[in-house]
Image: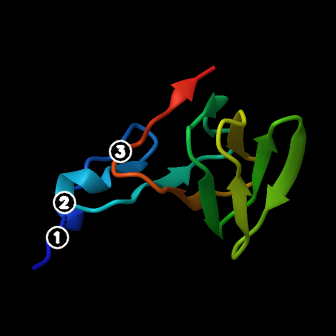
Amino acid sequence: MFNVLRSEDQQRGANRTVRFEGETLGGPVSFFIVDAEPGQGSMLHVHPYSETWIVRKGEAEFTIGGERTRGHPGDIVVAAPDVPHRFENVGDGRLELICVHPNGRILQQNL
């Protein structure tokens, strides 16, 4: 058996980001598909699980705990559970990345 969420049925946020919670289709993984303008990004937040980012296009700056790193297309960045983190599009063009949450629901506390 399988479930499908068609592209035309996906809800997009103001910055064209898609939020998917796996439990809606019976899956154990959730994610964001981010499509952000320069200067856009997430606010500082934490999760009770690790978060994995896959950079598809553009350049992101990740702040994880007290450290910063840059991510470019093809890079994978992982933040440990319960460590404050955020990302920002620091490039000249759009940033496309996938934020993977290993949980059926996205559990996030904004700081």
Can you tell which quarter of the image residue 30 is in? bottom left
Residue 78 in sight here = yes
Q: Amino acid at mark 2?
A: Leu
Residue neighbourhood size for the residue with mark 2, other residues' Cα within 10 Å, grouped as few (<14), some (14–19), many (≥20): few
Q: Residue at the spot x=70%, y=58% of the render?
A: 78
Name, please, the residue furthest toward the top.
Answer: 111
Q: Residue at the spot x=75%, y=59% of the render?
A: 59
* Earlier sequence position, callout 2 versus callout 3: 2
Q: 29 above or below 19?
A: below
Residue 90 in sight here = no
Q: 65 above or below 5?
A: above
Q: The C terminus lies in which quarter of the figure? A: top right
> What separation in Å lies between label 2 and label 1 (alpha carbons)?
8 Å
At which x and y percent is residue 95?
62, 57
User: Circle 1 — which element?
Assistant: loop
Can you tell which quarter of the image residue 45 is in? top right
> What separation in Å lies between label 2 and label 3 (alpha carbons)?
11 Å
> What numbered label is drawn on residue 105?
3
User: Circle 3 — which element?
Assistant: loop
Residue neighbourhood size for the residue with mark 3, other residues' Cα within 10 Å, grouped as few (<14), some (14–19), many (≥20): some
Q: Amino acid at mark 3?
A: Arg
At which x and y percent is residue 26?
20, 60
Q: Is residue 21 left or right of residue 52?
A: left
Pointer 3 with pointer 1, Cβ within 8 A:
no
Q: Which residue is mark 2?
A: 25
> What separation in Å lies between label 3 and label 1 (alpha carbons)?
17 Å
Q: Is residue 63 left or right of residue 46?
A: right
Pointer 2 with pointer 1, Cβ within 8 A:
yes
Q: Which residue is mark 1?
A: 4
> What numbered label is drawn on residue 54?
none
Name, please, the residue furthest toward the bottom.
Answer: 1
Q: Nearer the viewer, residue 91 or 82?
A: 82
